[in-house]
Image: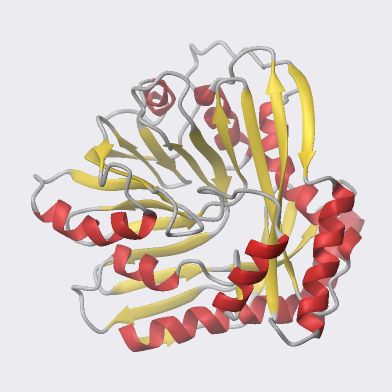
């Protein structure tokens, strides 16, 4: 069983890595689940593929926000080790020098998109819309994906650190999805299912008193609690036909280094243990935490108003084994990395009462998770 520190070296060889506070999973020698297939096709293919594979083989990777877009799920042997990913003591960190930084869209254009979404909400077209924006960083040399993964793990010990090759891992200069997601889409162990949706956020403050004030204000915010309720209600509604019990208590606060969130710990017991983790992903994704409510109406507004190509950002990222067990997070606090280019993405949920300037600040705070790991001072 490899030590978690070896995971950063495995990334260099093209492995898929997921690491949280309890364990690290490394999938080696991956091959495409469905070459060129959409996210939806790859999800459908998963169960049949694992039926034909030996023990120890898993499907792992990412499906995109838009399931009609190409997926990045691969099949291959995997090993799990206890404990989080830790930096390799022998590694030499060479921070890249940023030559150019470009927001897309600009903060002003993003605020205008928020105002357009608010107009659609006021017209009754939709209740909630999540809008994303990006920050593109061009470095003088190629970004080091292993170094970035190790730094994200060190800075975000409570999150799930991930590294997923989006293109063929044997291809030089291929794209990677890297990040430190705080949001558990679902964990399936036999009949038991755990989910922890996040919605409703506020940037943290370096001043302790102000930081606590912001946390208290978030818990008391009608706007943020409504935004959160749309997500939890949709998750519970989706689970009920599949589960004999579903429990969703009141939301609680969850802190990351950059953002306070409202979080709800949802637990459920499946009616039928042939329902796999991938079946649940296909039913739940995308939740209103990354899309909106109602789902189809929000997706239409996103297509018309948002200016970024999300790719696997805000997708479902994780793994499933031959027993149908698996763990999937929401692909947030993530960046797409290819050679010298890094594209950091962040989004915010827009509901009635949202303030465009506040949403600009919220997305900036969320993008800081990757930005501060990549551009170390």
Asked if 8 appears above or below 249 in the picture, the reply is: above
- The answer to whether residue 293 is above or below residue 83 is below
Residue reaching furthest front? 304
Q: Position of residue 284 (x, y in %)?
A: 44, 72
* Residue 293 left/right relative to 220: left
Total number of numbered discs in the rendering: 0
Task: Residue 41: name its quadrant.
Answer: bottom left
Question: Which quarter shows the N terminus?
Answer: top left
Residue toward you, 181 or 141 = 141
Q: Can residue 48 be seen in this view?
A: yes
The residue at the point 38 percent across, 79 percent down is 268
Quick check: 178 above or below 47? Answer: above
Q: Residue 137: x and y, percent?
A: 71, 28
User: Do we see residue 212 in this rendering?
Assistant: no
Q: In this rendering, would 266 be left or right of 157?
A: left
Q: Which residue is drawn at 53% across and 37% down?
A: 178
Along the viewing direction, whichever of 239 and 82 lies nearer the viewer? 239
Q: Quadrant of the C terminus?
A: top right
Q: Which residue appears at 81% of the width and 64% of the height?
A: 114
Position of 35 with respect to 140 (left or right) is left
Q: Residue 318 location in percent, x, y?
A: 39, 51
Relative horizontal placement of residue 144, taking residue 373 as reference (left or right): left
Residue at 71%, 52% (x, y): give it.
Answer: 307
Colouring convention used in this rendered image of the protein: secondary structure
Q: Where is residue 367 in the image (x, y as percent from the top left)?
A: 72, 44
């Amino acid at each position: 069983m490899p030590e978690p520190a070896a995971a950063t070296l495995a990334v260099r060889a093209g492995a898929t890595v997921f690491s949280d506070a309890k364990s690290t999973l490394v999938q080696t020698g991956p091959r495409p689940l469905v070459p060129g297939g959409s996210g939806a096709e790859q999800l459908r293919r998963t169960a049949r593929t694992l039926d034909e594979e030996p023990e120890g083989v898993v499907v792992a990777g990412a499906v995109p926000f838009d399931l009609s877009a190409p997926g990045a799920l691969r099949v291959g042997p995997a090993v799990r080790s206890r404990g989080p990913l830790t930096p390799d003591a022998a590694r030499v960190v060479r921070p890249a020098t940023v030559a150019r930084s470009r927001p897309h869209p600009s903060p002003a254009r993003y605020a205008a998109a928020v105002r357009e979404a608010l107009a659609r909400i006021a017209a009754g077209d939709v209740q909630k819309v999540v809008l994303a924006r990006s920050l593109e960083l061009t470095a003088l040399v190629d970004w080091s994906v292993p170094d970035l993964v190790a730094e994200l793990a060190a800075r975000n010990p409570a999150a799930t650190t991930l590294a997923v090759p989006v293109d063929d891992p044997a291809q030089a200069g291929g794209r990677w999805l890297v990040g430190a997601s705080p949001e558990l889409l679902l964990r399936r162990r036999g009949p038991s299912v755990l989910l922890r949706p996040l919605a409703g956020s506020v940037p943290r403050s370096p001043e302790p008193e102000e930081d606590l004030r912001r946390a208290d204000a978030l818990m008391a915010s009608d706007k943020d609690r409504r935004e959160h309720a749309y997500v939890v209600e949709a998750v519970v509604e989706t689970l009920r036909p599949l589960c004999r019990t579903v429990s969703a208590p009141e939301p609680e606060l969850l802190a990351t280094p950059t953002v306070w969130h409202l979080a709800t710990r949802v637990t459920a017991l499946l009616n039928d243990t042939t329902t796999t983790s991938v079946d649940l992903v296909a039913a739940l994704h995308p939740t209103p935490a990354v899309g909106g409510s109602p789902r189809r109406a929000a997706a239409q507004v996103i297509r018309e108003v948002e200016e970024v190509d999300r790719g696997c950002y805000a997708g479902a990222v994780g793994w499933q084994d031959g027993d149908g067990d698996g763990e999937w997070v929401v692909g947030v606090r993530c960046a797409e990395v290819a050679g010298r280019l890094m594209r950091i993405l962040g989004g915010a949920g827009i509901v009635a009462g949202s303030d465009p300037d506040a949403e600009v600040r919220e997305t900036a705070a969320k993008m800081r998770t990757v930005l501060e790991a990549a551009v170390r001072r």
